[in-house]
Amino acid sequence: MTRVLVIAEAGVNHNGDFEKAKKLIEIAAEAGADIVKFQTFKAENLVSSFAKKAEYQQHNFTEASNNQFSMLKKLELPFDWHQELIDYAKSLKIQFASTGFDEESVDFLEGLGQSFFKIPSGEVTNLPFLEHISKKNKPVILSTGMAEIKEIIDAVEILKINGLTDDMITVLHCNTEYPTPYEDVNLKAMLHIEQVLGVKIGYSDHTLGIEVPIAATALGATVIEKHFTLDRNLPGPDHYASLEPMELKAMVKAIRNIEKAMLGDGIKTCSNSESKNKIIARRSLLLKKDLAAGTIITIDDLEIKRPGTGISPMKINQVIGLKLKNDLPKEAILQWEDLI
């Protein structure tokens, strides 16, 4: 199994506060994530002035207005913050990235040297946006929340028509309800995407907790993306469905452990670490009582006990009917050289 790319999704959980953005980078680095990712957009390029909030946004970002524009305006990551955040992330040995939600933001991120582009779920059906990103000729990670498989096929085809190859595309299974009910995760859909499209797969998670990303890793996800926050009780649309710092650290550790557990050729055999336990945990054929030389062994003469240093109980039928070469005491562990 190749190393899973773990994206710690800071998103808009900085709440428009530069120091919070820096703290989020610190937390992601401390947790061992590969990438800390934010969201770059200009509200006026993204939503109309009259667009309403999603239900979860209303619930998690309580303010008098139900206006999506006013909410997002407060959550922008200003362009002039980016370079300092990139440098800060570099100093902590974690990669900075951001999802561009509009073409201006994508071009800006390209100018900063971002090595890949993330297409958010809401843009799966945005033909001009898909074309714009694909023409950058950089690897793409595509989230698929709310999408039908046909829409995903169409989106990937657009990316490929405009020059991207299969190995440049990773498709993330995703559900965009915050938080996602477990019964709506449909994790096996990730494998369906892989089967139908033949591209790398991953999982972007919005459930509460860390169980589902770990399960996705075991199923073969090459990328795991998960929202995190400084504090789930902070005001904002995404905090409630995000991990707190210690949870993020636990998730990354679990993913790394699963990576190790998935190594190997898949053939069941005794591993090096457990081979020493064979003689401890397995049993041998022992004598139930003192027996004299020449005694013909019967089933009533034998018992099966640890340790496994003698003849295996699997050979019991071959032992019955043989004779003892020498006198042996009760609980003697039978060896083949004891028999004729």
Image: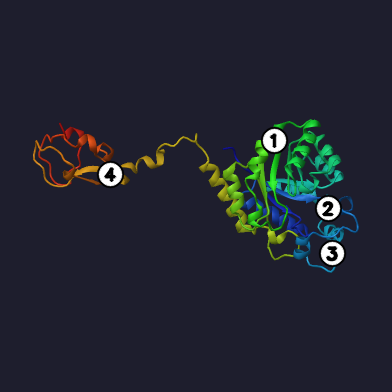
Could you give the CA–CA distance between mark 1 and mark 4, rounded to whole angstroms?
51 Å
Q: Which amino acid does label 3 sit on?
A: Asn
Q: Which of marks 4 and 2 is nearer the N terminus?
A: 2
Helix, strand or loop at label 1? It is helix
Could you give the CA–CA distance between mark 4 and mark 3, rounded to whole angstroms?
71 Å
Vertical comparison of 210 with 113: above or below? below
Q: Which of 62 and 249 is in front in this view?
A: 62
Vertical comparison of 318 with 8: above or below? above
Snapshot quadrant of residue 168: top right
Q: Name the image quarter holding the C terminus.
A: top left
Q: Which of marks 1 and 2 is nearer the N terminus?
A: 2
The residue sitting at 12% across, 41% down in the picture is: 328
Q: What residue type is labelled 1?
A: Leu
Residues at marks 3 and 1 touching, judged by CB atoms closer than 8 Å = no
The residue sitting at 30% across, 45% down in the picture is: 280
Comparing labels 3 and 1, the label whose residue is closer to the camera: 1
Q: Nearer the viewer, residue 30 or 200?
A: 200
The reply, left or right, for residue 207 in relation to residue 265 is right
Residue under pointer 2: 78
Q: Can residue 262 be seen in this view?
A: yes
Residue under pointer 3: 66
Q: Name the image quarter holding the N terminus.
A: top right
Residue under pointer 1: 197
Q: Give percent across and percent down for residue 46.
A: 86, 51
Q: Which of marks 1 and 4 is nearer the N terminus?
A: 1
Q: Is residue 93 visible?
A: no
Bin the neighbour count of mark 4 within 10 Å (Cα to Cα): few under 14, some 14-19, many 20 and up: many
The residue sitting at 59% across, 45% down in the picture is: 217
Helix, strand or loop at label 4? It is loop
Helix, strand or loop at label 2? It is loop
Residue under pointer 4: 283
Bin the neighbour count of mark 1 within 10 Å (Cα to Cα): few under 14, some 14-19, many 20 and up: some
